[in-house]
Image: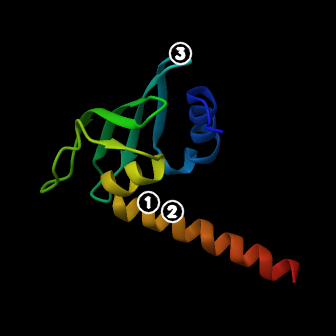
Amino acid sequence: MSISVREDVGHIQQHYQDFFESFQLQSMTDASATFIITLAEEDGNARRLTIERTPVCFQILSDDGMPAGSESCKGEAFESIEQLLNRVAPRLFQRKMQQLTMAKLAKELEAG
């Protein structure tokens, strides 16, 4: 059973909010959703991506504010939000995933 576009966007808003400086939903139907995310880069710049979520993929419609030396991801498609985040902000994604893993391990150690 596949997850609906609406459910997936809701899941992203709920569970990935710490990854984004901002998340702005522009439109949503049963077939697709368009949203803008802003990611804070290490150099202080903000990278702004417009993304369309369809039942098949996440497609980057626009990519503004890339760090120097980075290529635009406009037009690229990804199967998951994790793949997209790892492509556009690998250091941020890896750091956040490491923090989540460490927090989970600490919680498990506390529980014994």
Q: CA distance from mark 3 to mark 1?
A: 28 Å
Q: Residue at x 87, y 84 (%)?
A: 112
Residue hosting label 3? 29
Which numbered disc flags the more N-terminal residue, 2 or 3?
3
Q: Residue at x 40, y 37 (%)?
A: 58
Which numbered disc flags the more N-terminal residue, 3 or 1?
3
Q: CA distance from mark 2 to mark 1?
A: 5 Å
Q: CA distance from mark 2 to mark 3?
A: 30 Å
Residue hosting label 2? 96
Helix, strand or loop for disc 1: helix
Residue farthest to the left, as pictured? 69
* Of the two numbered discs 3 and 1 in the rendering, the one whose residue sits closer to the viewer: 3
Residue hosting label 1? 93
- Asked if marks 3 and 1 touch (Cβ < 8 Å), the reply is no
Amino acid type at mark 2: Lys
- Asked if marks 2 and 1 touch (Cβ < 8 Å), the reply is yes
In the foreground, 95 or 76? 76
* Of the two numbered discs 2 and 3 in the rendering, the one whose residue sits closer to the viewer: 3
- Relative to 102, residue 83 above or below: above
- Relative to 101, residue 14 above or below: above
Amino acid type at mark 1: Phe
- Asked if marks 2 and 3 touch (Cβ < 8 Å), the reply is no
Q: Position of residue 69 (x, y in %)?
A: 12, 57
Amino acid type at mark 3: Thr
State the colouring used for the structure image: rainbow
Residue 49 image-quadrant placement? top left
Residue 7 image-quadrant placement? top right
